[in-house]
Image (tube, helix red, strand yellow):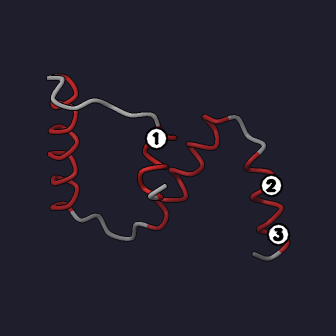
Amino acid sequence: MNPDTTKLLEDALKLPPEARAALAGSLLDSLDDSLDEDSEAAWETEISRRLQELDDSKTRPIPWAEARRRISGR
């Protein structure tokens, strides 16, 4: 990263969590040149399925620290 980008990142990290989340979302949106309607619909279906599994107690959430540990294989 160049010095300007580093300074921008440092300033962004000082923002409150809600503002950082909004900024991150805007930056990610700016990278998406074209919307794939099929993938959007597939994600909506998957999200609905996962939420229903949680509602039906077919699965249980785990804390992020545990998920990260499992992903890392530790």
- Marks 1/2 in contact by CB < 8 Å: the verdict is no
Q: Secondary structure at mark 1?
A: helix
Q: Residue 53 falls in which quadrant of the image?
A: top left
Mark 1 vs 3, N-terminal side: 3
- Marks 1/3 in contact by CB < 8 Å: the verdict is no
* Label 3 crowd bin: few (<14), some (14–19), many (20+), radius 10 Å: few
| Mark 1–mark 2 distance (CA, rounded to whole Å) | 28 Å
- Reading the image, the residue beneath label 2 is 10
* Label 2 crowd bin: few (<14), some (14–19), many (20+), radius 10 Å: few
Q: Secondary structure at mark 3?
A: helix
Pair 1/2: label in front = 1
In screen coordinates, is 57 left or right of 23? left
Q: Position of residue 17 (x, y in %)?
A: 64, 36
Per the rendering, the mark at residue 3 is none
Mark 1 vs 2, N-terminal side: 2
Q: Residue 58 falls in which quadrant of the image?
A: top left
Pair 3/2: label in front = 2
The relative height of residue 55 versus residue 21 in the rendered view (above or below) is above
Identify the amino acid type marked 3.
Answer: Asp
In screen coordinates, is 70 left or right of 22? left
Identify the amino acid type marked 2.
Answer: Glu
Image quadrant occupied by the N terminus: bottom right
Per the rendering, the mark at residue 4 is 3
Identify the amino acid type marked 1.
Answer: Glu
- Reading the image, the residue beneath label 1 is 66
Q: Residue 36 falls in which quadrant of the image?
A: bottom left
In screen coordinates, is 37 left or right of 21? left
Mark 3 vs 2, N-terminal side: 3
| Mark 1–mark 3 distance (CA, rounded to whole Å) | 36 Å
